[in-house]
Image (cartoon, grey):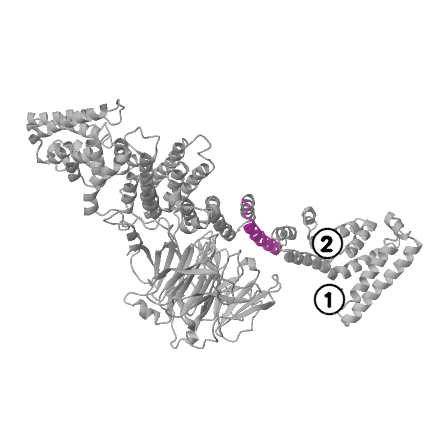
Amino acid sequence: MNQVTKFDGTHEDLIHDVAFNYYGNRLATCSSDQKIKIWDYNEGEGIWESSISFKANAVKKWTPVATLRDGNGTVQDVEFAPNHLGLRLAIVAADGLVKIYEAMDVTSLAHWTMIDSFPVGEGPSKDEEGNHCLSWSTSKFTSQMMVVGCAKDHVAKIFRQDHNNKWQACEVLGGHGGVVHDVSWAPNMGRSYNLIATACKDGHVRIFKLTDDSQGGALTGGWSRKMFNVTCIADFADHNAEVWRVEWNVTGTILSSSGDDGKVRLWKATYTGDWKCMSVVSAEEGPNGFQR
Amino acid sequence: MSTGIPLIQPSNTALTLNATAAKRSIFSAPTVDLNPNHGMVHDMDRDQNDEEYVAILHLDPSPIKKGVSADSWAKTNRTLRSTFRPTTNEIAVYVAGRKAAEEFPTKQKSSVEDNTIFLCQAAIPKSRIPFIEQTFKVFLDIASKNPYKTGGTSGYKHHLERYNKTIEEHLAHLYVVSKTNDTLEIEQETTLMESFSAVWQLAEAVFLKSDRNRPIAFMFNEWLATHDTSQDQELGKTLLADSSKLTHPDFWSYIRRCLLRGMIESVIFILEQTLNDEEDEQVAKALEDLVRVLKDIPSSEKTFPPGEFHSRHMNWKEECKKFTQSKHVKHLGKGAKDVMKVLSCEAEEIIDVSDCWEEAVSGTFLFVHPDCERENIGQILETCLPPFLESTDVTLLDRIKIAILQMDDVKTVRLCGEFHPWLVAHLSTVLQQYGYLDMSVIDLQDIATQGWDSNIHDFFVISYAQSLMSNLSLWEIVAGYLIRCGHTGRSTLSEWICHVPLNSSKKAHKVLKFCEENDLKDSLRSINRVMAVEEEKRGEYAQAIQHFIVSKDLDRVAKVVDNLVLGYLERGQFDLDDALASIEALDTTSTHVQFLRSYAGFHRDYKNGKLAKAGETLVKLLSNGTAPKKYWIVLLLDALPLLENKQQVIFGSSDTFVLMQSLEELVGSQYKSEYLQLLPQSSSGSTSTVEDAQLDVLRLSLTRNLARSFVHPPHRPDEDILMT
C-alpha cells in the first residue's frame, strides 16, 4: 500500500463523506461548509480535477430530481438497493423506521413511491447516540435482505422479506458492547455463505458469517425454520477507539475499517478463512514499513 | 594477471549483469512481505507469527501532528475515514467530521490536511507490466492443455522453461535499466524478480521427476551459485591480482566459502595461481597437494555404474583425510584451518565453518552426501538447519526455500502465498497441472464442504488477479485469470467487469465481446444498459434501442421510441434515416420497435408517393394494436393528407371505418385528455376549442372519404372481398 496521489478538497470546513461513482472515475465530497463538490479523474495525467461545486439548493448543472419527505426524524443512513432489485433505496431515520422507496420512472427519477416500511426496534431512539445504519444484501438468489444497526439496542439485525413480501427480522448479530456505528454486507461473489461486518462504539470490528441453516426446526419470528447459522468469525479490537466505518471492496474480499485512532485498517482472508490485517493507513507521522 | 576461468561458476545472467545484493521492499505488490524483518522466526513452523506484521503507511502530510495524540485529535470532532474506489481496490482516505458542525459546540478551523483526500493503493510498478503480460500468456497455454490427455506430463518442462525465460528476460531488462535509471522502484523490482527466480528454479530442481537422474547435490550447488551472490566476485579478483595472496587476510575464508559452495574449479584456479608465485618450497608442496586432492574429487555430475560413485567418493574422502592430517598442512598457516575442516568431510565440521544455512547444506551435499537422493534431503536438513535457525534470523524467503528442500509441496505453496500472489498463483498452477501437488488435501473448507467448483489453487489465482485490478489497463488479463477459476472466479468477474470504465466505444465493444464469448449474462445486460444510456445521450437512438433490448429494459426502449416520435412531432421529420436500417434489422418482439419500424415505413412510403401502401400501413397500425394508444391521434392526423387526396381514394370504406372507430375510441374514453395530449396545441385560445376544431376537421374528412369510397372504391383485392 502506498500513497498514489492526493488533492485538496478545497472545502471551508470538515468533510463528512466521500463517495465514488460506479466506475470510480468521479468522486463527490460533502462538508459542513454545506457544499458538495464533484471531482473527475483525469486519466491521462493521473490527477483529480474539480468538476463542480454547489450548495444543496443551488440550481446548476446538478439539480435535485426528487425530494423524499416522509420521514419523522433525522435521516441517519441511506443506501441504494442492488441493481437486480431495480431502482430502490432504503432510508433509516432516527424514528427507528426503515423506509424503502422505488423510482416509478427510472428515466426521469422524479417520482419515488414508498413501497415498504418497517420498524427496526422497540420504538424510536431518542438518545444522542441512537444511530441507525443499514446495508443491503446483494445476493441475487435469495429474497430481499438487509442488515440494520439498531441504535440503543446495541445489536444489528438481519431483515428479510417473507413469503408474503413482509419484512421481518430473522437473525440478530449480537455481542456488541455499544452502539453499532456501521454495518456492511459483503458482495456475495458466488460464496455459499454471507459475510457482514460491523463497526462498533466499543472499538471492535466484527465479521459475522451467515450460513444457510440446513437443520431447520427452530421457530424464529414467524419463520417456519431458522434462516441462518450466525457465527462471529472475527472480532478485532485493534483500533482501540470508536470504529465508525466498515466497508467491503466490490469483490467482497477486502474489508476496510476506520476509527478514532486515526487509522484505516484493511483486512483480508487467508485461504484457511482466517482474517488478517494486511495494511494500516495512519494519520499520524511515522516511518512507512512493516510493524508488529 | 588473466582471469580466464570464471571465479563464480556456473555463469548466469544475474551475475553477468551485476545483480543487486538482496534487498527488501514492502510496496511491490499488495501482499508482498519482503521486509527483512517480516516473517523472521526462530522456529520455522510457528506460522502464526506471520500475522504479527502489517504494512504501515503514514499519510503525508500527516493530519495528526507530532506531539498530538490520536485521542486528543479525535476530541476535536475529527476522525479518519476511507472509501473504496470501485474496480481498483484503491482507497480514498480523508479526515472526516465526527459530528455535523452545528452539533459540535466549538467552531473548528480546518487545516490543509483536514481537507486533503489521500488516494492509497497497492500499485503495480510500470516496469512489471510486460512481465505480467508475458506470464499470462504462459498461464493461458498451461490452462488450455490437459496434461493427462495430451502426452502425459512431459510438457511441464516446456512451461517451466517459459516461465524461467520470462523471469530471466525481465531481470536482464531490469539490470540494464538500473544502469541508467537506478530508482527505488527498479531496485525493489529487481529484488522481487531475483527472489522469484531463486524460488522457481529451486522448486524445479527439487520437485520435478524427469530430472531425477541429476544428483540433487549438484543441482543445489548450481542453484546456490546462481542465486546467492553473497560471495564477493571483487574479492576474488583482488586476490588474483595480489602478489602475496596467502598473506591476504581474506584468502582462506574466500577459499572456504568457494569450497562450501561447490566452486571447486575456481578454488583450483586461484590455488594454482598462488602456487606459481610461491617461493617457499614447503608451502608450495602443501598447495600442490591441496590442488591434487581437489582435482581428484569425483564429479557428481558424471554418470557412474551403480555403487561406483559412492566407492569413488569414499576413496576420495580417505585421500582428503590423509591430506588434512599430513604434516605439510601446517605450512599453509592458521587461516587454512577452516578449509581443512571442510575437507574433513564431516558434517559437524562443515556446519561449524559455514556462514549460512545454504552453505552448510551445500557443503554437506558436496563433501558428505554427494549421492543423496531427493527423498533423503530431509535428513541432511535436520542436521544442517538447527544451528542457523537458533542463531540467525530466517526470512520468509528462507522458509520457502527450506520448505522446497523438505519437498513439502503444501507448505511451499502456503508460504509462497504469503510472499507474493504472482509466485503462488503460477507455481501452484504448474505443480498442480502436472501432478506434483495435490491441492485437494488443502481445499478451502467452506467452498469444499458446499460443493462449489473451486479450490485452493483458484483462491491463489483469484488473489493474484485481484492484485492486478489496481491497473485497469490490465483488465483483460484480470478477466482471463478469473474466468478460469471456477464458480468463484466467474462470480467475481461477473461483478467486477461491470465496473471497468467504458472510456471509448472500442473498449466498450471489447468488454461486451468478452462477456458474450464467456457467457457472462448478467454482466452483458448491465454493460448493454450502460452503453445504451450513453448512446441515447449522444443521440445514437438506433444503437441505444438495440442495447436496451439486449439488456431487457423494454421500458427504456419505449422511452427512446417516445423521444423519437415526439422529436418528429416537433420537427416534422425523423432524425434517424440511416439508423432506421439497423432498427429494421433488429429481431425483436418489442411492440414499440415494431411500431417505430412501421411508422417510419409509413413516412418513407408517403414521401416516395406510395400512398396506397402508406395508407395500408396506417390502418394496420391502428387495427392490430401495434401503435400505443397515445399515438393514435398522431396517426389519424397523419391520415389527413391521404383522406383529402383528390387524385385517388386511398382508404376504402372498411379502412375508413377503422379510422373512425379509432377516433371515437379516443374521444369516448375516460382518458380522452391523455390520449389527445399529442394534438398540436395552439398558442392562443383555449385548449378545448383548438382540440374540438381539429377533431371536427378530422371527422369531416373521414366522413367525406367514406362517401368517396362508396362511389370510387380503391381497387385492392382485400377491399373487394370486404365489400362483397
User: Which label was assigned to residue B595?
Assistant: 2
Subunit that carries the residue with mark 1:
B
In the displayed structure, does residue B656 sit left or right of residue B58? right
Picture layout, residue B601 above or below residue A163? above
Subunit that carries the residue with mark 2:
B
Q: Which amino acid does the dot numbered 2 rest on?
A: Phe
Q: Residues within 10 Å of mark 2 (few under 14, many from 20)?
A: some
- Residue under the point 61% across and 56% down: B537
In the displayed structure, does residue B564 sit left or right of residue B654? left
Indicate whether residue B530 is drawn in magenta. Answer: yes
Q: Quadrant of the C terminus of chain A?
A: bottom left
Q: Is residue B369 visible?
A: yes
Q: Which residues are magenta?
A: B518-538
Question: Looking at this view, is B348 or B535 the one in front?
Answer: B348
Q: Residues within 10 Å of mark 1 (few under 14, many from 20)?
A: few
Picture layout, residue B500 above or below residue B302? below
User: Which label was assigned to residue B299?
Assistant: none
**Image location of residue B262, percent across then percent down:** 22, 32
Callout 1 and callout 2 share a chain: yes
**Image location of residue A167, percent across then percent down:** 53, 66
Q: Which amino acid does the dot numbered 1 rest on?
A: Glu
Question: Looking at this view, is A41 or A1 the one in front?
Answer: A1
Find disc 1 in the rendering and name its residue. B674
